[in-house]
Image: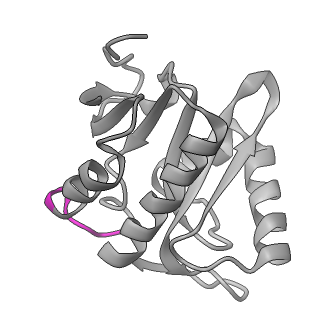
Amino acid sequence: MIYEVVGDILLSKAQVIAHGVAANDPMDQGLAKSLHENFPALHKDFHHWCHQQHPKPGEAWLWGGVDGVRIINLLTQEGGYGHGARPEKASVSNVNHALRALKKIIQKEGFSSVALPALATGVGGLEWGEVLPLIKNQLGELNLDIYLYSTYQAGKQAKEPDI
């Protein structure tokens, strides 16, 4: 079931948080910056993975940290390669492919809940009206709780049904 919620995704009680990035993203803007600040090892491990795998937009990578923290990095944007290179804007196609990759990870890992931000609408530059139908199409039939943090409110615990 998909629930749109209001609050701070970093306070989610979902089993895993997913967010959009570019390969080798500096993680210095938006939700990625907050995740980098809260989980410095995520940033280091993500860059190591990018250098080893040379991922393409549309792929996804699951990171596991201490205390059972799980974060799925969805490659929704091009760019990030080269010293000082900035990620480009997200594309509907990349987001759709990344959501398909997210679906595979969810099914493989057996997650019962996932939290998603208003994916690719901040730094990624897409409109929520373009992204929400993709999420519903790719993830709507899964048997788990999906919490869409469509409106961010710092420090506010969202009401996540069924948790």
Q: Main secondary structure of the magenta part?
A: loop
Is there any visible trace of residue 91 in the rendered image? no
Give the percent coordinates (x, y) of residue 89: 38, 77
The boundaries of the magenta stretch are 124-129
- 90 relative to 18 in the view: left or right: left
Location of residue 53 with respect to 110 vertically, above or below: below
Q: Which quadrant of the figure contains the C terminus?
A: top left
* Residue lying at 31% horizontally and 41% vertically, measured from the top left: 141
- 36 relative to 96 in the view: left or right: right
Q: Which quadrant of the figure contains the N terminus?
A: top left
Location of residue 83 with respect to 57 vertically, above or below: below
Is there any visible trace of residue 73 in the rendered image? yes
Give the percent coordinates (x, y) of residue 131: 25, 59
Location of residue 21 with respect to 50 vertically, above or below: above
| Front residue (pair 154, 130) | 130
* Residue lying at 37% horizontally and 33% vertically, measured from the top left: 146
Give the percent coordinates (x, y) of residue 124: 37, 68
| Front residue (pair 100, 160) | 100
| Front residue (pair 2, 84) | 2
Snapshot quadrant of residue 85: bottom right
Give the percent coordinates (x, y) of residue 117: 38, 44
